[in-house]
Image: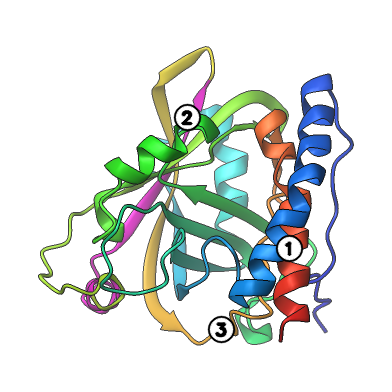
Amino acid sequence: MISSKENVVTLHRPNSLGELLGLWAGGLMAPSYALGSLVRQARIFHPRGVYFKAEVDVADEIDPQFEALADGLTKGDTMVRLSTGFWSMGRLMLPDILGVSVRFNAAADAGYVAQDGSQDLLMVTSKFLLTLPIAALLTNSRDFLANDYHGMGKYSLVGKPNMYLRLRSMIQSSNSSRDRYDKIRTDVADGDVVFTLEAASRLEPSRWYPLVQIRLVSELTIDDRVTMFWPFRTGLGIRPEGFTQFLRPAPYLASQWARNAGG
């Protein structure tokens, strides 16, 4: 029997003053997130998403230093959620941030709930926290495949600190649908949607190393009200670090609590 860890959250001990300050600042923000989610009766950010089953393969020409990590990401079953940042409508094309959340090493026969060894990654179309307003203007909110997605902070990758993550689409959609959700569903049905997860060091931010390729296979029916991607679910060794990453836990938990409390 698979032990579900969907509602079990852990948080790594802060290793620096910046991480401690991020945790403290996030706590100050949490009440506003809870209030917003209560009023909206949904996540305050990324309220609507579409889920897909995915297949993961080690990228071609993988750098030896990342072989073990990439191989681990191919284990188990993988689920991907594509979402809008604030607006939930499919055709309302106001400036927005798009997001991609990935759960590695889940179990399809258990509804893709988190288990021991699962890894969640939460990516958005902004490189950094401070660039969110500009990124909302630059994001092509009409098409999930027309943007790059970033971890918006630093990570430690199986012991290698100060790393950035990026998710890139390998194709551009030729679908003319005006609804971004219909567009991505059609592209997935055509077998055309592949993302590459890449890593770069803060010391060499322009040198990106491909880790794995993620192919979206088919749409999943997942209960959006109970599924919880958690940035500190790190079962495969990808650990968030730094101020921005530690800013996230308290608002995430507050929003989740308010969403459930509001029914």
Mark 2 Cα shell of 10 Å, populated few (<14), some (14-19), many (≥20): few
Residue drawn at the location 31% of the way across and 59% of the way down: 144
Q: Secondary structure at mark 3?
A: loop
| Tag 1–tag 3 contact (CB < 8 Å) | no
- The residue indicated by pointer 1 is 34
Q: Position of residue 135 (x, y in %)?
A: 37, 39
Q: Position of residue 149 (x, y in %)?
A: 41, 45
Mark positioned earlier in the residue sequence (1 or 3): 1
Name the one closer to the observer, 2 or 29: 29
Amino acid type, mark 2: Asp
Mark positioned earlier in the residue sequence (2 or 3): 2
Q: Position of residue 111 (x, y in %)?
A: 64, 83
Mark positioned earlier in the residue sequence (2 or 1): 1
Q: Secondary structure at mark 2?
A: loop
Name the one closer to the observer, 68 or 141: 141
- The residue indicated by pointer 3 is 222
* Residue 194 within the segment the image draws in magenta: yes
The numbered dot on residue 63 is: 2
Q: How is the image coloured?
A: rainbow
Q: Secondary structure at mark 1?
A: helix
Determine which quarter of the picture holds residue 209: top left
Residue drawn at the location 80% of the way across and 79% of the way down: 2
Name the one closer to the observer, 105 or 166: 166
Residue at the limit of the structure toward the right, as seen here:
13
Q: CA distance from mark 1 to mark 3?
A: 23 Å
* Residue 165 within the segment the image draws in magenta: no
Amino acid type, mark 1: Ala
From the image, state whether disc 2 or disc 1 is nearer to you. 1
Residue drawn at the location 59% of the way across and 63% of the way down: 44
Q: Position of residue 140 (x, y in %)?
A: 25, 51
Q: Which residues are magenta?
A: 183-201
| Tag 2–tag 3 contact (CB < 8 Å) | no
